[in-house]
Image (cartoon, rainbow, N blue to C red):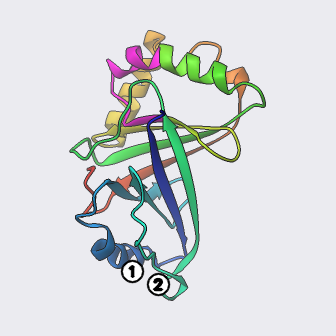
Amino acid sequence: MSVCVETFVLTCRSGSVPQVVAALEAPLVGRAGFLGCWTTELGILNQVVVMFEKLPDDIVWPGSDHGVQGIVQQEWTLHAGTSPQPGTYGGAYEWRLYDILDGCEAQVVGLMEASTPARAEISPAYAVMTASQGASRLLHIWPYADLADRAAKRKLAVESGAWPPKNILPLLGTMQSSILTPVAFSPSR
C-alpha cells in the first residue's frame, strides 16, 4: 500500500490571510495527523497550505465570511523515502509543483527516486510526491533556514550535478514554485 498525504490549498481574498490563519488554529491544533500549515510568501500569494496524513472527517474549514475563495484538496503518494513529519526544519519551504507529461509518470518517479538521496546530502526534502488522483503532477517540498540558505544549497546542488535529476526536464510540463512560511501553530516549522 502506498503512503499518502493530503494537502489543502485555501485561496484567500487579498488581506484576509491573517483572519483565515486565525480561524484555522482551533480546528487544526492537536489533531492526529496534522503535519503543517504554511502561508505563501513568494509565488502565488494569498494562499494557506495545510497538510495532513489523513484529514479527520469533522474538520470545518473557514468559509467566504473569513475570506476563503476556494479550497483545492489533493491526495499525494510519497516517493524517494520521504515521509513528512512534524519538526523544526526552517523558515522557508520551497513548494515546487510540475505537470508531468502524458505517459511519463513512472519515468519521473524513477528519476526522482534515484536522484533524491544525492540531493538530500546537500539538503533533505520534506516531501517528494505525485498526485494520487487527477492530473499527473509532481510536487517536492524543500525546507531551508531562509532564502539565502536556499540560494546557497540550490547552487551547490546544481554545480555538483546532484540536481536536477538527469533527463527529467523533457518529461515535465508547466512548473510553479512558491516559498511558504510556517504559521505559528504549524507542527512543521
Q: Which residue is mark 1?
A: 19
Q: Residue at x 52, y 61 (%)?
A: 9
Splitting the image into 4 quarters, where does residue 127 fall?
top left
Q: Viewed as shown, does residue 98 lie left or right of 173? A: left
Q: Residue at x 65, y 19 (%)?
A: 107
Q: Which residue is mark 2?
A: 66
* Residue at the bottom extreme, as displayed: 65
Q: Viewed as shown, does residue 57 lie left or right of 33? A: right
| Depth check, front residue: 34 or 69 | 34
Q: Secondary structure at mark 1?
A: helix
Q: Are marks 2 and 1 in contact (CB under 8 Å)?
A: yes
**x, y (%) of residue 147?**
36, 42
Residue type marked 2: His
- Counting other residues with Cα less than 10 Å from the Cα at mark 1, is it few (<14), some (14-19), or many (20 or more)? some
Residue type marked 1: Gln
Q: Residue at x 33, y 77 (%)?
A: 22
Q: Is residue 103 above or below residue 174?
A: above
Mark 2 and mark 1 lie on one chain; the one further toward the N terminus is 1
Q: Is residue 104 above or below residue 84?
A: above
* Residue at the right extreme, as displayed: 102
Q: Residue at x 49, y 19 (%)?
A: 113
| Depth check, front residue: 168 or 31 | 31
| Depth check, front residue: 132 or 70 | 132
Q: Give, as a single range, the part of the protein colored magenta.
A: 115-128
- Counting other residues with Cα less than 10 Å from the Cα at mark 2, is it few (<14), some (14-19), or many (20 or more)? some
* Inter-mark Cα distance, 2 to 1: 6 Å
**x, y (%) of residue 97?**
58, 41
